[in-house]
Image: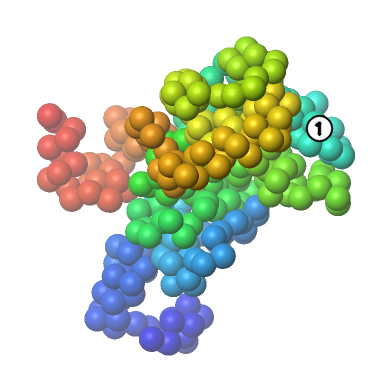
Amino acid sequence: MAVSKYENGKATPSSTVLLSLADALNVRVEYFLRPEHVELEMQGYRKHHKAPNRLLDRIKADVKEKLDRFLELEAVLPVLPVGEFRVPRALADRIDTYVDVERAAADLREAWGLGVNPIPELIDTCEEHGIRVFRTSIPNDEHFDGLAALVRGNPVIILGEDWPGDRQRFTLAHELGHLVLEGRLAKDLDMELAANRFAGAFLVPEQAARRALGDKRHWLEPRELWLLKQEYGLSMAGWLHRARDLGIISDQTYKRLRQEFKARGWLKKEPFGDYPGEQPRVFEQLVYRALAEDLIGESKAAELMGKPLMQFHSECTA
């Protein structure tokens, strides 16, 4: 298919071609009939090195379709009940060490009024502070590690729909790190390592980690790590990293624990059960708000939600 000709307006696809494109990109046909589409300005975009271009194209198309619907909804609302994302004023202009990265995570927590306690719903928290979060339904997400972009100056973060909750949360916190650290990180610091350190510190501040584990440990029990995973939404392996970063366990103890995790297959699938996944709520809430205020009709609400009208009506009246 000469897709570039359609993208550049040099040719008009037939209905058969539209159906084929929609199937290939896993979007609805209506996506191609909209007069205007948003553009994604990549920022902090990271992907698994094996991710095929076809998968990335499907992810981007899925994201654009969701954003088109979100922006169409925003256009009819007189006031948006969500804030605008802002980098904390207290944040240092230059971040020279990984300890400074920890401080940056603490600054964001303070700016958002989170204290040092666990964040029960990280997606909700990000949406409340002006970050649009979407989950992609694209299959084979084992080759996709998250996507961050700017749309009309507003940050957007994409997560895998079928990921365990702890993976969703770490990816979201990692991409937050990119947004906060961008343009401030010293050249001798690795951005991906810094974003990982930021994610760990944002999910589990140092004070909370020391309260949970103590200042010095010679070993960490797997069941203990699972309980902490359920409390903070940071994976068991993430807790190992956190304990090493803060000097709670030595490098030698960390290596021994990692070896045990690897031998038991826990680096691929952690034991004792997953942390529950989260899902965005703001878009759905705004659809029902617009419907209640007669800003849109039921058919438009169903279209925005991507549901058949009868199904949407049934859910509204159940």
Where's residue 44, x and y in %? 65, 53
Q: Nearer the viewer, residue 62 or 301?
A: 62
- Residue displayed at 51% across by 67% down: 50
Q: Is residue 253 above or below residue 303?
A: above
Identified by mark 1, the residue type is: Asp
Where's residue 47, x and y in %? 56, 59
Q: Tell me if 190 is positioned left or right of 56 in this view.
A: right
Where's residue 186, x and y in %? 86, 46
Query: From where the camera sits, is residue 36 visible?
Result: no
Q: Nearer the viewer, residue 200 or 299?
A: 200
Quarter holding residue 108 = top right
Quarter holding residue 247 = top right
Residue for badge 1: 100
Where's residue 126, x and y in %? 54, 33
Label 1: element kind: helix
Q: Tell me if 197 is positioned left or right of 3 in this view.
A: right
**Quadrant location, the N terminus:** bottom left
- Residue displayed at 42% across by 38% down: 270
